[in-house]
Image (spheres, rainbow, N blue to C red):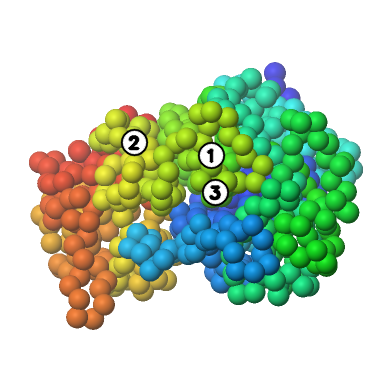
C-alpha cells in the first residue's frame, strides 16, 4: 500500500532556471496547479543567456509579460549586431551582422521581435509572474529521489535551509534540471551528438573607461580576436558593467584556479587593446558548450525539458529559446491531459515534435559558432558543418512533420531552407493583424480586451478553428456543437467582412485588406484548426459534406481521444 505523500500536485517541476520558470508560467496561465523546486537560493545573478528570439517573445506576449520583459531589458534596448575585431582601440574590425532585423522585415511574420534581456533580469520577471498565477515555487529545495508507477511520481524533497524532508506525489514530473540532469541520469536516458565543443570562463567586471573605448558601437557581443587574448565582450549596462568570455582549455590540463583576478584583468586589457584599462573583476563562472540531444524526452510519467533534454553551442542563443519553447509545447499538452480534454497519448507527441527540432537546432548552433569563430572553438572534423545562412527559418519556421497534427507531410524538413508560414499543418500559424467587430462574451477575457490583435494572440488556452465569415462551409456552427457536446476546449472565430464576422483583417487606410484564407492556404469554404501553442493542427482547403463529423474525427486524432 502506497504511503500518503505530504503534498499532492498535478505537476512537479524540478529546476527553477529559465525553462523551469517558463514551465511554471505557462502551466499557471492554463490553470494547472504545480510545485517547482530549485536547489539554489534564488534566481540567476550572472548576466548570461540574453538573446530572446522572436518566437520566444511571441510566447511571452501571449502570456502577458512582454511589457515587463522589455522594461527589464531597457538598458540594452539600443544594442544590435555582433562585431568582430582584433581590438577595440581604433576602428578596425567588421560587423558579422549589424542589425537583427534590418529594414523591419520581420513585421511580416510576427507581431513582436527579438529582445535582449539577460537571464538575471528575465528570471525575476518570470518568477513574479508565475507566483502571481498561483505557482508554488520553492528555492533552496532539492529533489533527492523519485519513483514512478503507472499513476504518477513520488518524490522526496529536502528543504536545504532547515534540512527537513517531505514527499510530493504528482501526476507528472518535468525535469528542467540542467545539462547534467540527475533525473535523466537516474532514468538511464542516453544522449547523442558530438559532445563537448569548447569551454569558457565567464567574467563579470567593472570598468568606467571601457565605455569611451567602445564609443557608439552598441553591439550585442564583440568577438575580440588577438591570438594571445581572444574572447567575447558583452555589455551589461553600456556604462561600467561588462561580461567577458575567456577561452578555457581543460583538455590541455588547464585548471580553473589558474584564472586569477590578475590574469583575467591582464587578458581583458590585452583583448580590448588598452594596456592601462581599469578592470575590476567582480565574478567568475565556468561553462562548457556541447552538442547533445537526449535519446528520448519521456520516460513514463517523467518528461525532460531544456538543457536536460538538449545542449547546444551558445552562439545565437538557440539553447535557452529552444528550452522555453519545449516548456510551452509541453504545458498545453499537460493541461489538456490533466483537464480531461485530451488522451494521455498526447504526451507522446512531445518527444515526436521537440526532439527533432532540438537535433536540427543544435547542429545549426554549432555551425553558427564556426561562422563566428567563437573564441576557444576549434571544431573537430564534421562538427559545425551543417547548413549556414539566415536563422529566422530556425527560430520561427521550424515544423512538426509528426506529432499532434493531421495532414502534415512526414517527409518535410524540420527546419526548411526559408520561412514559409502559409498555414501548412505542423507549421506555426501565420501572423495577421485583426480588428474586433463586436463583443464576444464567450471568448477568452484576454482577447476581449484587445481592439487590434494578431492571430498569434488567439492561441493559448484552447484549440481554435478559423473559418471565413463569407463561407458556406458550416464550420463555425459545427465547432460550437462539438465544443458544447464533447467537452473539448475549442474556440471558433469567423474572419472576414461578411455578416456574423468576429474578426476583420486589419489594413492601413486606403489599403486592401489581406486575404486571411489565402494566407492560411484555404478558401472561403474551408477552415484551419490551430493548437493552443499556435501551430496548425489541420486544415481543410474547401468545404466538406459533414463538417461536424470531420472536425470531431480530426480532434480525436490530434488530441489522442479517438
- Give me the residue at 27% from left, 34% from top: 409
Element type where label 2 sits in the image = loop
Q: Dots 2 and 1: beta carbons under 8 Å? A: no
Q: Which residue is mark 1?
A: 366
Q: Residues within 10 Å of mark 3 (few under 14, many from 20)?
A: some
Is 73 displayed left or right of 345 in the figure? right
Instruction: Quickly name the residue at label 3.
Output: 372
**What is the crowding at mark 1: few (fewer than 14 residues within 10 Å), some, or many (at least 20)?**
many
Asked whether disc 1 touches disc 3, contact meaning CB atoms under 8 Å apart, the reply is: no
Name the residue beneath numbered marker 2. Answer: 413
How far from the left and from the top, in percent, is residue 430? Answer: 31, 55
Which sits earlier in the primary sequence, circle 3 or circle 2? 3
Q: How many residues crowd mark 2 within 10 Å: few (<14), some (14–19), many (20+)?
A: some
Where residue 240 appears, x then y in whole percent? 75, 70
**Residue 434 % position (x, y):** 30, 68
Instruction: Give coordinates of residue 295: x percent, y percent.
Output: 53, 24
Mark pair 2, 1: CA separation: 19 Å
Q: Residue at x 31, y 67 (%)?
A: 433
Q: Going by the image, does 337 lie left or right of 482? A: right
Amino acid at each position: 500500500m502506497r504511503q500518503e505523500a505530504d503534498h499532492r500536485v498535478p505537476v512537479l517541476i524540478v529546476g527553477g532556471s529559465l525553462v523551469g520558470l517558463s514551465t511554471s508560467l505557462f502551466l499557471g496561465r492554463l490553470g494547472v496547479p504545480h510545485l517547482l523546486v530549485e536547489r539554489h537560493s534564488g534566481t540567476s545573478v550572472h548576466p548570461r543567456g540574453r538573446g530572446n528570439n522572436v518566437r520566444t517573445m511571441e510566447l511571452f506576449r501571449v502570456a502577458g509579460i512582454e511589457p515587463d520583459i522589455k522594461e527589464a531589458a531597457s538598458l540594452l534596448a539600443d544594442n544590435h549586431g555582433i562585431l568582430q575585431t582584433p581590438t577595440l582601440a581604433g576602428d578596425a574590425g567588421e560587423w558579422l551582422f549589424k542589425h537583427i532585423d534590418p529594414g523591419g522585415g520581420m513585421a511580416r511574420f510576427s507581431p513582436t521581435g527579438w529582445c535582449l534581456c539577460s537571464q538575471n533580469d528575465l528570471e525575476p520577471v518570470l518568477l513574479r509572474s508565475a507566483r502571481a498565477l498561483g505557482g508554488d515555487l520553492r528555492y533552496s529545495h532539492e529533489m533527492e529521489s523519485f519513483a514512478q508507477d503507472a499513476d504518477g511520481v513520488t518524490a522526496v524533497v529536502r528543504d536545504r535551509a532547515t534540512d527537513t524532508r517531505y514527499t510530493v506525489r504528482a501526476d507528472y514530473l518535468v525535469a528542467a534540471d540542467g545539462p547534467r540532469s540527475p533525473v535523466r541520469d537516474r532514468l538511464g536516458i542516453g544522449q547523442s551528438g558530438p559532445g563537448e565543443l569548447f569551454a569558457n570562463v565567464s567574467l563579470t567586471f567593472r570598468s568606467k573607461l571601457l565605455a569611451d573605448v567602445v564609443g557608439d558601437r552598441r553591439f550585442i557581443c564583440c568577438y575580440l580576436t588577438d591570438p594571445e587574448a581572444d574572447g567575447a565582450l558583452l555589455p551589461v549596462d553600456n556604462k561600467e558593467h561588462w561580461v567577458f568570455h575567456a577561452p578555457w582549455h581543460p583538455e590541455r590540463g588547464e585548471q580553473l584556479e589558474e584564472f586569477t583576478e590578475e590574469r583575467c584583468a591582464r587578458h581583458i586589457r590585452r583583448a580590448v587593446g588598452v594596456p592601462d584599462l581599469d578592470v575590476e573583476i567582480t565574478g567568475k563562472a565556468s561553462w562548457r558548450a556541447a552538442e547533445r540531444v537526449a535519446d528520448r524526452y519521456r520516460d513514463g510519467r517523467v518528461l525532460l525539458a531544456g538543457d536536460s533534454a538538449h545542449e547546444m553551442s551558445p552562439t545565437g542563443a538557440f539553447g535557452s529559446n529552444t528550452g522555453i519553447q519545449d516548456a510551452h509545447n509541453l504545458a498545453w499538452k499537460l493541461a489538456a491531459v490533466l483537464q480531461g480534454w485530451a488522451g494521455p497519448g498526447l504526451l507522446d507527441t512531445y518527444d515526436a515534435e521537440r526532439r527533432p527540432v532540438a537535433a536540427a537546432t543544435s547542429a545549426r548552433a554549432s555551425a553558427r559558432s564556426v561562422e563566428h569563430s567563437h573564441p576557444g572553438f576549434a571544431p573537430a572534423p564534421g562538427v559545425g558543418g551543417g547548413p549556414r545562412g539566415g536563422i529566422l527559418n530556425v527560430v520561427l519556421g521550424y515544423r512538426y512533420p509528426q506529432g499532434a497534427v493531421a495532414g502534415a507531410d512526414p517527409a518535410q524538413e524540420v527546419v526548411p531552407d526559408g520561412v514559409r508560414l502559409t498555414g501548412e499543418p505542423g507549421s506555426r500559424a501565420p501572423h495577421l493583424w485583426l480588428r474586433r467587430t463586436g463583443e464576444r462574451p464567450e471568448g477568452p477575457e484576454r482577447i476581449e480586451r484587445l481592439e487590434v490583435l494578431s492571430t498569434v494572440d488567439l492561441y493559448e488556452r484552447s484549440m481554435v478553428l478559423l473559418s471565413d465569415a463569407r463561407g458556406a462551409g458550416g464550420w463555425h456552427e459545427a465547432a460550437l456543437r462539438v465544443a458544447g457536446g464533447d467537452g473539448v476546449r475549442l474556440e471558433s472565430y469567423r474572419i472576414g467582412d461578411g455578416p456574423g464576422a468576429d474578426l476583420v483583417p486589419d489594413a492601413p487606410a486606403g489599403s486592401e485588406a489581406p486575404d486571411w484564407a489565402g494566407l492560411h492556404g484555404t478558401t472561403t469554404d474551408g477552415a484551419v484548426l490551430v493548437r493552443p501553442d499556435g501551430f496548425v493542427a489541420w486544415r481543410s482547403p474547401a468545404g466538406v459534406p459533414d463538417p461536424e463529423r470531420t472536425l470531431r474525427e480530426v480532434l480525436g486524432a490530434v488530441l489522442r481521444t479517438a
